[in-house]
C-alpha cells in the first residue's frame, strides 16, 4: 500500500513538474485567457511559430482569472490577461493589476475609445435587436427604449441577467443615462417578456423563429457563429434574422493587458502587438465573426451585410463601476 | 499492534484537519459583519434560492427514489424478456453528465433541433413554438432524475438481491400479491438502502452548477456565483456557502435519523429469490417499460450526440483532442485512486476508534461534496497562495492545487462507499484474524482489504465518473496548458457550439460507462 | 388421501435433485422427512409450497389437483405455509403485526381474537409489541409458527424447525408442538436431519437416505 501511494505521489509530482513555470530568459509568455475559442488557440500557436516564444495558457472565466491574478499580486504568474467584457477593466485598474503598454505599432489605426494606458481592445461585438424577417415588426424600432414599448407586450426575449452581456449592457446604460432611466428601462423590458429568461444567445434567435416572441436581444457575434454552424438548420435561422442596430448600440469588447510586475514583459508586449496585427485581426473578424478594432480590416460577410451603425461612446474604464448597480436593478425589477 | 492502529488515527486526523483548515474560511465569514450587498441578497435572492433548491432537491429525491427502487424491485422479483442485459444497462445513464444532457435536450427541442425540424420539414406541420417549449424547472428535474436515478437503483438492487429472498417467499405462501409485498415488505425493509442512494442524488443536485446555470434557475450555486461574480462580493458568496452547508448538515442528520430508525437486523442466511417469470401480456408490458426508460434516458441522448459527432468531426482539432483525452485519462485515474486511498484511511480510522473525533472527521470530509465546486476552488486557491508565500515557492501553479481541490470535493463520495463496505463486512472476520495472532495491520491487509475490494472498486468508479466530468475546480485550479475533455465540452458549450461539444461529450460518457460496466458486471454475474 | 405426491422429479442446473419421488399424507398427521443435507429435503418443501416447479410429477391436495401435466397452481393460490429455517420474521413488524400479516378474510374483531388466541397458545402475549430482534430463538420460532397458522393453511411445512435452538429448549418445544398440532388437527410436513426429532414427533417417517 505504501509503495502504491509513493508511486502515485511520484507520478503526480512529475505531472506537476511538467507544468510549473519558471522564467528563463524571455522565451516564454504566460497567458490567462477567458477567450476559450479555437481561433484564439490557433493564433497563439501561430505566435509561437513566428517568434519561437513558448506560450503557456490557462483558460477560465474572466472574473475568476482576474480574482486569481489579484491573489497572486505579490508574485505574479501571468504575463498577459485576455478576456471578454470591458466591465472587467475597472476591477483590474482598481486593484492595480496592470502595467502600461506600448501602443505605438497600432495606435494610429485604433479609435481612442478602444484603448487605455494599460489595456487595448482586441475585438468588439454589438448587442443588437433581432426579429424574424418572415414576420416583420409592426413599427419602426430605433432604440433599446422601444423594447419597453407597450406594443411589444409579451413579445420580448432575452437571456438571463446572469449573462455578463446583459449586465454590461445595463451598466453602460447607467453610465450614459443614469440610474433612474436605466431602471425604468429594465422594468419596461421585464414587463414585456414573452417568457422567463432562459437559454443562451443562440436560443433567443431560435425562440424568435419558433414564434415564442417577436424581438430578442442578441450579440452579433452569435449571429455570425450561427451562420457558420455545422447544423444546416442553424444556418437557415441565421439567414432569417433581421438585425436592428439601435441608436447607441452597445459594444462589448474583448481586451488584452500586461500584468504588473510581469516576469516576461518583452514577450508579453510582443504577443499583444501580434494580436493587433492585420492578420490576427482578420482571423478574429472572418473566422470568429467579431468586429475588428484595427481600421481597414475586412468584416465577415454576414456582419458586413448589416452595414454601418451608430454605436455608443462610453468610458470602458468606468463601466465596471456600474455593474453592482446593474445587478441590483435586475433583481429589483425581477429580470431573472 | 497498538502503533499500527494509531497510524490510521494520525493519518485520518491529518486529512480531516487539513480539509477543515482549507474550508474554514467559509465559516469564519459567518462571524464577520455582513457586507453592504448582503441585505440585497437576503431580500432579493435568498427566498428564491431556498425555494428552488428545495423544489429541485425534494422532487428529484422523490422521483429517483420511486423510479430507482421500483425498477430494482421488478428486476429482483420478475423475469422477463431482456432482463439480464437491461438490468445492467440501467446503470449507464449515470455516465451522462447532467450538464451535457441539458444542452442536448434543449438543443433537440429547440427550433433547429430534430423534434421541431421533423414536424416542420418532414410532416409539414407548423405547430406553435410554445408547443415544444421546455420550461426550465421541469427540464432540470427531468435531467437530474434521468442521470441520477441509477444511484438509488444501485443501492436498492444490491440490497434487494442479497436480502429479500426468504421474506418474499414467506409472503408469497401467505397469498400476498407482488404489489402487497412491494408495499408491506420490500419498501420498508429497503428504506436505508434507498436513503443512501437518495443522499447521493440530493448532494449531486445541490452541488450542481452546469444545469441550473444553463437553465437560469436561481438555485444555491447560481446565487453563490451571482453574488460573487456579478456583485463582486466574495464574502457574501462564502456566507451563502456556509448557509448551504448548514442545510446539507441538517439533511445529513435527517437521513441519519431515518436510517437509525429503519435499520434493523436482517436474516442470517440471505438467499437469492426465485424470480417469477412474466409471460404473455404482463411480460410484454414489463419489457416495454424497461425499453421505454432506457430509450428515454440513454438511447435518445446518445444517438443525438452520435449524430452531432458525425456532423462536427471536421471541425475538431484532433491533436488538441488527443492531448485532452490522454490528460483526462491519466489524471482521472490517478486522482480517483488517491481519493479512494485517503477515504480508506479515514474510514478505517473511524472504524477502529469510532468516537466523537472520528465521526466529526467523517462528517467534515463529506462536507466538501456539498459545497459548489467553484467555492471549493476559491478556498483552495486562497489556501495555496498563502502557503506559497510562506514557503516562497509557487505551489499554486502546480498540479497539486487541482489535486487537493478534487480530493476535498469528492472525498465524501469515496467515504460513503467505503464506510458502507465496512458496515457490510462487520468486524467478525477481522477479529477472527486477530485471534489467530495477526497484528492489526496484518489482519487489515490480509482480511479486510480483500473483503472491501468491491466497495473500493465501486467507490473508485463513482469518484471517477465525477472527476472526469468535473468543471469548476478544473477550470479554476488547473496548471498551465492543462485541458481535459470536460474543459473542451465547456469551451464549446459556453461558445454556444453544442454540436462541436458532442465528440468530447460522447467520449466522457463512453469512458464512464465502461467503468460502470466493468464494476457492475461481476456483481451482476453472480446471479443470472 | 389428503395430500399426494406422485413421481415428482426436480433438476437444478441439469443436476437431478429429486428423482421420481412419491408420498401420501393423511389429514391431521405429522410427516417427518429425514435425510442428510443435499438430499433435496428443503427442495421438496419448496415444491409443496409452490416456490419451485418440478420437471414432472403430480401433486394433489385436498382433492384438488395442484400439479400435473396441464395444471400448475401458483404458491399464492395453494394455501400451503412454509416456515423457513431462519424463520424470516419481518424485522420491521412487531410480533403482533407479523402474525396479523398472514390472516385472510376476517373482520377486525375476529382477526384480533384469532391473534390473541395464537399469542396465548404460543405463550407470546407479553411480547406482542416487541420486534423480532428483541426475541430469543425459541420465541422467534413460536412467532413463525403462529404466523404460519394464522394463515389457516391446508398444509404446514417446517424446514429444520429445531436447528437453531439449544437442546433443552428443543425438547420442550417438540412436546408442546406435537400436542398443539394434534389438538388443532393441523396437517404438518417437517424436514429434519435429526432422527430423534422424527421419531418423537411424526406419525409417518420418510427417509430420503434410503
Image: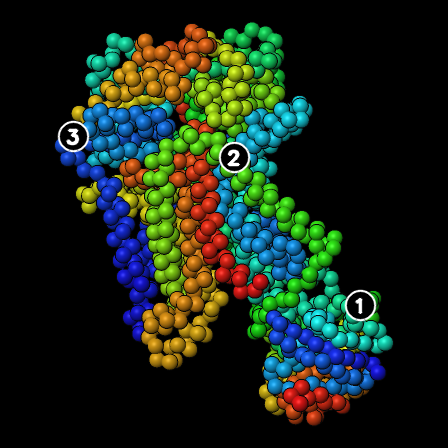
User: Residue B307 got which mark?
Assistant: 2
- Figure label count: 3
Residue C131 picture location, percent across and down = 63, 71
Can you identify the residue that label 1 sits on? Answer: C70
Residue A285 % position (x, y): 37, 17
Chain letter behind tag 2:
B
User: The N terminus of chain C appears in which quarter of the rendering?
Assistant: bottom right
Front: mark 3 or 1: 1
For residue A37, above or below residue A312? below
Structural crowding at the residue carrying mark 2, measured as other residues with C-alpha within 10 Å and reported as few (<14), some (14–19) or many (≥20): some
In-front residue for pair A56/B113 = B113
Q: Secondary structure at mark 1?
A: loop
On the rendered structure, is A284 left or right of C42?
left
Nearer to the camera, B468 or B311 = B311
Q: Residue at x 31, y 39 (%)?
A: B482
Cα–Cα gap, marks 3 and 2: 46 Å
| Image side of residue C79 versus residue A1, left or right | right
Marking on residue A26 = 3
When asked about the image quadrant of residue A191, the answer is top right
Amino acid at each position: 500500500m505504501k509503495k502504491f501511494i509513493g508511486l502515485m505521489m511520484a507520478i503526480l509530482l512529475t505531472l506537476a513538474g511538467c507544468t510549473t513555470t519558471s522564467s528563463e530568459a524571455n522565451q516564454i509568455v504566460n497567458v490567462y485567457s477567458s477567450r476559450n475559442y479555437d481561433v484564439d488557440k490557433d493564433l497563439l500557436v501561430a505566435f509561437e511559430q513566428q517568434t519561437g516564444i513558448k506560450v503557456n495558457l490557462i483558460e477560465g472565466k474572466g472574473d475568476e482569472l482576474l480574482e486569481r491574478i489579484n491573489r497572486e499580486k505579490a508574485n505574479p504568474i501571468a504575463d498577459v490577461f485576455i478576456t471578454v467584457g470591458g466591465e472587467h477593466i475597472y476591477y483590474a485598474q482598481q486593484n492595480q493589476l496592470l502595467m502600461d503598454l506600448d501602443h505605438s505599432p497600432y495606435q494610429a489605426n485604433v479609435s481612442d475609445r478602444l484603448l487605455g494606458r494599460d489595456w487595448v481592445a482586441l475585438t468588439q461585438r454589438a448587442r443588437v435587436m433581432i426579429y424574424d424577417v418572415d414576420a416583420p415588426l409592426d413599427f419602426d424600432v430605433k432604440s433599446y427604449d422601444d423594447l419597453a414599448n407597450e406594443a411589444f407586450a409579451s413579445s420580448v426575449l432575452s437571456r438571463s441577467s446572469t449573462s455578463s452581456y446583459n449586465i454590461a449592457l445595463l451598466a453602460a446604460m447607467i453610465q450614459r443615462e443614469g440610474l433612474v432611466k436605466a431602471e425604468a428601462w429594465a422594468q419596461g423590458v421585464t414587463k414585456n417578456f414573452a417568457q422567463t429568461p432562459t437559454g443562451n444567445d443562440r436560443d433567443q434567435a431560435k425562440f424568435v423563429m419558433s414564434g415564442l416572441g417577436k424581438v430578442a436581444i442578441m450579440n452579433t457575434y452569435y449571429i455570425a457563429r450561427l451562420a457558420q454552424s455545422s447544423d444546416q438548420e442553424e444556418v437557415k435561422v441565421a439567414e432569417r434574422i433581421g438585425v436592428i442596430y439601435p441608436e447607441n448600440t452597445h459594444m462589448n469588447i474583448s481586451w488584452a493587458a500586461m500584468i504588473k510586475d510581469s516576469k516576461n514583459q518583452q514577450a508579453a508586449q510582443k504577443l499583444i502587438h501580434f494580436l493587433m496585427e492585420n492578420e490576427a485581426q482578420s482571423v478574429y473578424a472572418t473566422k470568429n465573426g467579431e468586429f475588428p478594432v484595427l481600421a481597414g480590416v475586412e468584416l465577415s460577410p454576414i456582419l458586413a451585410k448589416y452595414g454601418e451603425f451608430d454605436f455608443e461612446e462610453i468610458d470602458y474604464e468606468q463601466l465596471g463601476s456600474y455593474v453592482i448597480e446593474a445587478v441590483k436593478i435586475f433583481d429589483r425589477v425581477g429580470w431573472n | 499492534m497498538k502503533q499500527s492502529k494509531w497510524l490510521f488515527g494520525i493519518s485520518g486526523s491529518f486529512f480531516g484537519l487539513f480539509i477543515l483548515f482549507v474550508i474554514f474560511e467559509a465559516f469564519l465569514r459567518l462571524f464577520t459583519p455582513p457586507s453592504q450587498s448582503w441585505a440585497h441578497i437576503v431580500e432579493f435572492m435568498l427566498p428564491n434560492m431556498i425555494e428552488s433548491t428545495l423544489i429541485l432537491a425534494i422532487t428529484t429525491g422523490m422521483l429517483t427514489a420511486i423510479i430507482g427502487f421500483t425498477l430494482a424491485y421488478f428486476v429482483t422479483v420478475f423475469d422477463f424478456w431482456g432482463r439480464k442485459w437491461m438490468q445492467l444497462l440501467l446503470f449507464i445513464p449515470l455516465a451522462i453528465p447532467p450538464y451535457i444532457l441539458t444542452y442536448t435536450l434543449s438543443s433537440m427541442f429547440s427550433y433547429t433541433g430534430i423534434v421541431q425540424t421533423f414536424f416542420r420539414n418532414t410532416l409539414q406541420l407548423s405547430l406553435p413554438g410554445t408547443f415544444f417549449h421546455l420550461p426550465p424547472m421541469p427540464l432540470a428535474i427531468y435531467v437530474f432524475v434521468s442521470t441520477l436515478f441509477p444511484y438509488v437503483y444501485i443501492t436498492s438492487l444490491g440490497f434487494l438481491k442479497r436480502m429479500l429472498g426468504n421474506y418474499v417467499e414467506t409472503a408469497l405462501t401467505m397469498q400476498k400479491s407482488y404489489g402487497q409485498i412491494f408495499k408491506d415488505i420490500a419498501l420498508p425493509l429497503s428504506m436505508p438502502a434507498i436513503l443512501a442512494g437518495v443522499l447521493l442524488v440530493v448532494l449531486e443536485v445541490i452541488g450542481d452548477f452546469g444545469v441550473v446555470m444553463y437553465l437560469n434557475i436561481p438555485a444555491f450555486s447560481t446565487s453563490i456565483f451571482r453574488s460573487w461574480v456579478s456583485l463582486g462580493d466574495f464574502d457574501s458568496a462564502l456566507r451563502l456557502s456556509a448557509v448551504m452547508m448548514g442545510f446539507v448538515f441538517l439533511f445529513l442528520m435527517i437521513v441519519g435519523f431515518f436510517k437509525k430508525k429503519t435499520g434493523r437486523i436482517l436474516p442470517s442466511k440471505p438467499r437469492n429469490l426465485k424470480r417469477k417469470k412474466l409471460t404473455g401480456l404482463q411480460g410484454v408490458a414489463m419489457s416495454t417499460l424497461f425499453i421505454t426508460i432506457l430509450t428515454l434516458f440513454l438511447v435518445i441522448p446518445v444517438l443525438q450526440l452520435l449524430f452531432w459527432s458525425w456532423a462536427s468531426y471536421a471541425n475538431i482539432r484532433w491533436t488538441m483532442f488527443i492531448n485532452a483525452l490522454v490528460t483526462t485519462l491519466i489524471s482521472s485515474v490517478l486522482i480517483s485512486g488517491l481519493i479512494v486511498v485517503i477515504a480508506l484511511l479515514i474510514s478505517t480510522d473511524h472504524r477502529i476508534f469510532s468516537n466523537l473525533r472520528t465521526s466529526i472527521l467523517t462528517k467534515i470530509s463529506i462536507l466538501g461534496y456539498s459545497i459548489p465546486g467553484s467555492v471549493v476552488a476559491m478556498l483552495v486557491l486562497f489556501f495555496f497562495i498563502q502557503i506559497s508565500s510562506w514557503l516562497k515557492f509557487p505551489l499554486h501553479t502546480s498540479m497539486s492545487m487541482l489535486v487537493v481541490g478534487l480530493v476535498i470535493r469528492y472525498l465524501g463520495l469515496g467515504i460513503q462507499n467505503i464506510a458502507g463496505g465496512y458496515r457490510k463486512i462487520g468486524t467478525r472476520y477481522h477479529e477472527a484474524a486477530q485471534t489467530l495472532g495477526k497484528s492489526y495491520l496484518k489482519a487489515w491487509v490480509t482480511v479486510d482489504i480483500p473483503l472491501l475490494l468491491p466497495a473500493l472498486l465501486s467507490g473508485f468508479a463513482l469518484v471517477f465518473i465525477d472527476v472526469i466530468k468535473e468543471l469548476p475546480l478544473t477550470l479554476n485550479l488547473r496548471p498551465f496548458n492543462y485541458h481535459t475533455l470536460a474543459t473542451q465540452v465547456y469551451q464549446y458549450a459556453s461558445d454556444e457550439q453544442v454540436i462541436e461539444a458532442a465528440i468530447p461529450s460522447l467520449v466522457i460518457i463512453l469512458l464512464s460507462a465502461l467503468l460502470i460496466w466493468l464494476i457492475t458486471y461481476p456483481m451482476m454475474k453472480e446471479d443470472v | 388421501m389428503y395430500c399426494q405426491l406422485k413421481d415428482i422429479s426436480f433438476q437444478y442446473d441439469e443436476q437431478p435433485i429429486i428423482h421420481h419421488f412419491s408420498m401420501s399424507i393423511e389429514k391431521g398427521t405429522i410427516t417427518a422427512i429425514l435425510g442428510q443435507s443435499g438430499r433435496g429435503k428443503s427442495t421438496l418443501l419448496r415444491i409443496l409450497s409452490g416456490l419451485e416447479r418440478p420437471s414432472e410429477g403430480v401433486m394433489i391436495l385436498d382433492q384438488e389437483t395442484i400439479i400435473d401435466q396441464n395444471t400448475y397452481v401458483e404458491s399464492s393460490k395453494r394455501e400451503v405455509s412454509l416456515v423457513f429455517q431462519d424463520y424470516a420474521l419481518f424485522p420491521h413488524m412487531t410480533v403482533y403485526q407479523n402474525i396479523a400479516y398472514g390472516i385472510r378474510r376476517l373482520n377486525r374483531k375476529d382477526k384480533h381474537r384469532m391473534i390473541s388466541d395464537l399469542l396465548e397458545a404460543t405463550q407470546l402475549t407479553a411480547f406482542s409489541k416487541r420486534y423480532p430482534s428483541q426475541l430469543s430463538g425459541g420465541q422467534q420460532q413460536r412467532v413463525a409458527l403462529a404466523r404460519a397458522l394464522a394463515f389457516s393453511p391446508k398444509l404446514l411445512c417446517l424446514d429444520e424447525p429445531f436447528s437453531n435452538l439449544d437442546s433443552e429448549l428443543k425438547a420442550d418445544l417438540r412436546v408442546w408442538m406435537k400436542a398443539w398440532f394434534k389438538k388443532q388437527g393441523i396437517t404438518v410436513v417437517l424436514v429434519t436431519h435429526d432422527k430423534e426429532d422424527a421419531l418423537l414427533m411424526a406419525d409417518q417417517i420418510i427417509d430420503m437416505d434410503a
